[in-house]
Amino acid sequence: MKIILANPRGFCAGVNMAIETVDKVLAMKGPPVYVYHEIVHNRHVVDGFCGRGVTFVDDIEQVPVGGLVVYSAHGISPEVRRKSKERRLVEVDATCPLVTKVHMEVLRYVRDGYTVIFIGHRKHDEAIGTVGEAPNSIIVVETPEDVAHLQVDPNAKLAYVTQTTLSVSDAQRVIDVLKVRFPNIRFPLKDDICYATTNRQNAVTSLSPEADLVLVIGSKNSSNSQRLVDRALEAGKPAYLIDDESELDPAWFNNKHCVLVTAGASAPEHLVNELVQRLRRDFGGEVETRTLMEEGIYFELPKSVRSLAVVS
């Protein structure tokens, strides 16, 4: 069986920065360290940090007064920051800079009197944090059908932004409907969907036609990982999202001669390696790495981490 190993895959710059941030905080301060929401949406990453003394919380009041909290890569609302200051928490912000970009766009649009349409999954951590910047001025839409049912003042100034981890094709379908219904709607000059999400989706779209089966390493609550599965399904290929090689079902490989392997932007590379090793061992897989483009983007650790070093 042939194994096509897609590149780029796995960790993006924002995920690398967020994980490195928690590593650095642990090294400087030691446990306990609290993280607001999962630092990234990957079970293996979260479990690994739990074993090192990190506690993940979904309510900032779960962090002891005066404690140290790291904000996840997905961003937070001003209300969370306000509560943190009330509790005199030491704050370390690991928000991905590309998510921060969307927050800044929202604030500029609202400042200029616009109602903002946020295209994304309303229950996702990133959406919750972004909407929290101006909850009375943002409307969340997930599908073209949502756009059709929007009720807005006909004289309102409108703008849209998008969640960074969306399917490019799904987002475009919503955008197309928005632009037809609201021809004067404003939008960011640069696409909000992050470079890594786009690159990984493009790789799946490009390579799926050669494969009989697509396997995506990533956790079920990872939006960008699920979008890779969606891309493969759009190409007419059977595709599965798995946390690791233990979730493989041998039945998937009946009459399959070529499998495409990739990983979401929050999935560690060692999980890909373990999957490939099993495919080699159990199915006689032979690997061919296919690189569509090289990524060289790096985000520095946040200033709040560097400030900790000064305090130490």
Image (cartoon, rainbow, N blue to C red):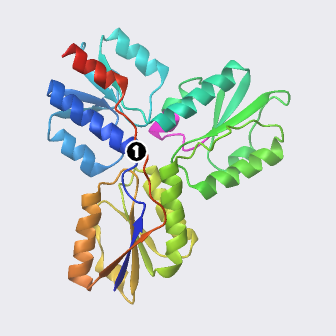
* Residue toward you, 186 or 291: 291
Q: Quadrant of the N terminus?
A: bottom left
> What's the residue at 42%, 14% (across, down)?
82
Q: Does residue 127 belong to the magenta stretch?
A: yes
> What's the residue at 33%, 22% (across, down)?
304
Position in image of residue 209 (x %, y %):
53, 78
> What's the residue at 78%, 37% (across, down)?
185
Q: Give neighbour class at mark 1: few <14, some 14-19, many 20+ (Cα, 10 Å).
A: many
Q: From the viewer's perspective, tell me whether residue 258 is left or right of residue 55.
A: right
Position in image of residue 158 (x %, y %):
75, 32
Q: Does residue 178 belong to the magenta stretch?
A: no
Q: Amino acid at mark 1?
A: Ala
Please tell me in which quadrant of the rendered image residue 89 appears. top left
Position in image of residue 149 (x %, y %):
74, 43
- Asked which secondary structure carries label 1, the reply is helix
Q: Is residue 303 above or below residue 185?
A: above
Q: Quadrant of the C terminus?
A: top left
Position in image of residue 171 (x %, y %):
63, 51
Q: Is residue 25 visible?
A: yes
Residue beneath disc 1 = 13
Q: Is residue 39 visible?
A: no
Q: From the viewer's perspective, tell me whether residue 98 is left or right of residue 307.
A: right
Residue at the bottom extreme, as displayed:
255
So how many labels did they put on this image? 1
The region drawn magenta spans: 119-128
Q: Is residue 285 above or below residue 66?
A: below
* Residue toward you, 90 or 78: 90
